[in-house]
Amino acid sequence: MHRRTAAIIVIGNEILNGKSEDKNAAFLISELRRLGVALSRITVIPDDLDDIARTVRECAARFDYIFTSGGVGPTHDDLTIEGIARAFGRAVVRNPELERMLKGYFGDDIDETRLRMADMPEGGLLIREREMRWPVLAIENVYILPGVPELFRSKFEAISHLFQAEPFYACAIYTREDEFDIAPRLNRVAAAHPDVEIGSYPVFTEPDYRVKITIESKETEAVERARCALLDALDSDSVVRTE
Amino acid sequence: MHRRTAAIIVIGNEILNGKSEDKNAAFLISELRRLGVALSRITVIPDDLDDIARTVRECAARFDYIFTSGGVGPTHDDLTIEGIARAFGRAVVRNPELERMLKGYFGDDIDETRLRMADMPEGGLLIREREMRWPVLAIENVYILPGVPELFRSKFEAISHLFQAEPFYACAIYTREDEFDIAPRLNRVAAAHPDVEIGSYPVFTEPDYRVKITIESKETEAVERARCALLDALDSDSVVRTE
């Protein structure tokens, strides 16, 4: 079973300088999780043409799906389309269908600034779904989404069915034992179960447990085998609960 | 005036799979801003040795300061020290001073698992500040911080004076004009004032304005010049306020 991977590239000085808080990555984390896609990287970069081109090129080569957020408006700091085109060595071209849509929408207000919204990397695709007024642009494995959270969300929701994969199975064990004490046993179980991902998260602010151990995989039996092995290895009196 | 740049590398599967929400990047965004350091990149990566090594190596070569968050505990998924050592082609060695401190702290409970907390990349430094019980490890321009938010925060606050730079000057203009309408004027002013960073952020949820325009620089006069040029270029009846 091929494990689908994804990367999110958030583009915008306003995130890095603290003027605006990114909400799109957090939204996509939970959406991709729900879809069964393994998110492998989130990168936040400035409105810089070279940085966009380089980051998109690297991610597109390593992961199955790339989602970009931001940088698609009409002003000087909106460089995403040009950066993505450069990542793939493509020209930026005006799409006749988008141009028609813009002329229909803006009527007499149409001008060169508004027409720039019809520009896309050569060879890109328009993804149309019934509920969308405006298509999502994609090129190769890169899906180009706007930074405004309401638009990012509605556009992703409209195309999310394209990314549906096998679900993840997960469980968690909460223990009162100290992470230093369980580490050798945990490491042994993790080494013996390479088909699952085991995480160990110490907490200092919970009154009833000290470590949350998580197990996950795309195979429910593998999760169950690792869960049993961990419960065997842990001091049973210290296990607060499993979920 | 050399503009100091920084990158944050958040390391942890739990962030990417949505089991835990990262708070450290948001904290560091505002701290670096306050210190006058330009944050140039945030990357969230999994607990993967090669990915850590590669990401640290690339960032360390491009930016002045690198801050890592997470992956420094005793379990199999704590790979940050080894990954950073690999980034710089160094061995992981046990630091005698940290070893002494651990033995003093844990007494008879000391074991190989706990002693692993004394491991660091060869040639690394221990940064000690009075209020810290445990030093911060650094190697080259990489500062290694724990993922637990309370610890991340207190450790960064203890060493933050090391990164103090010239402050940023910024202002904002709020206008009722449409972003498409002001874009040509905005682009002209931005091109004429390359010494400032101008941002344009359309909003759809505010009742009293449609675009927030931001101007920033390390030179207060440059911000003031660009602010005047922008106010000249914008329709003055539509400017709601400046700040």
Image (spheres, coloured by chain):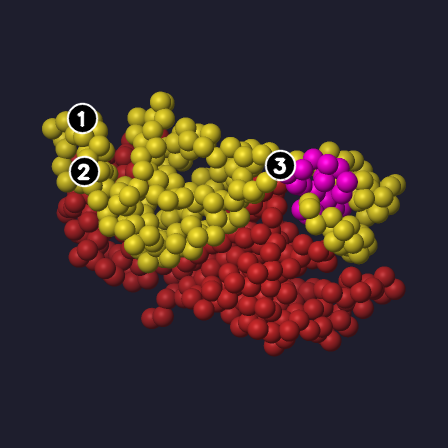
Chain colours: A yellow, B red
The answer to whether any part of residue B207 appears in the image is no
Cβ–Cβ below 8 Å for labels 3 and 2?
no
The answer to whether any part of residue A62 appears in the image is yes
Tell me the distance, in whole angstroms, between the alpha carbons under discs 2 and 1.
11 Å
- Identify residue type, mark 2: Leu
Quadrant housing the N terminus of chain A? top right
User: Is residue B185 found inside the magenta-colored segment of the image?
Assistant: no
Q: Circle 3 marks a residue in which chain?
A: A
In the image, is A233 to the left or to the right of B99?
right
Instruction: Looking at the picture, tell me which residue is in the foreground, B223 or B144.
Output: B144
Look at mark 3 in the image and give the residue it sits on.
Answer: A168
Q: Which residues are magenta?
A: A197-226
Tell me the distance, in whole angstroms, between the alpha carbons under discs 3 and 2.
43 Å
What percent of the width, then of the height, locates residue B131? 65, 64
In the rendered structure, find residue A104 and report the number of the disc placed on it.
Answer: 1
Specify which label sits upstream in the sequence, 3 or 2: 2
**Secondary structure under badge 3?**
loop
Number of other residues with Cα within 10 Å of mark 3, as a class: few under 14, some 14 to 19, many 20 or more: some
- Identify residue type, mark 1: Gly
Look at mark 2 in the image and give the residue it sits on.
Answer: A115
What percent of the width, then of the height, locates residue B64? 45, 68
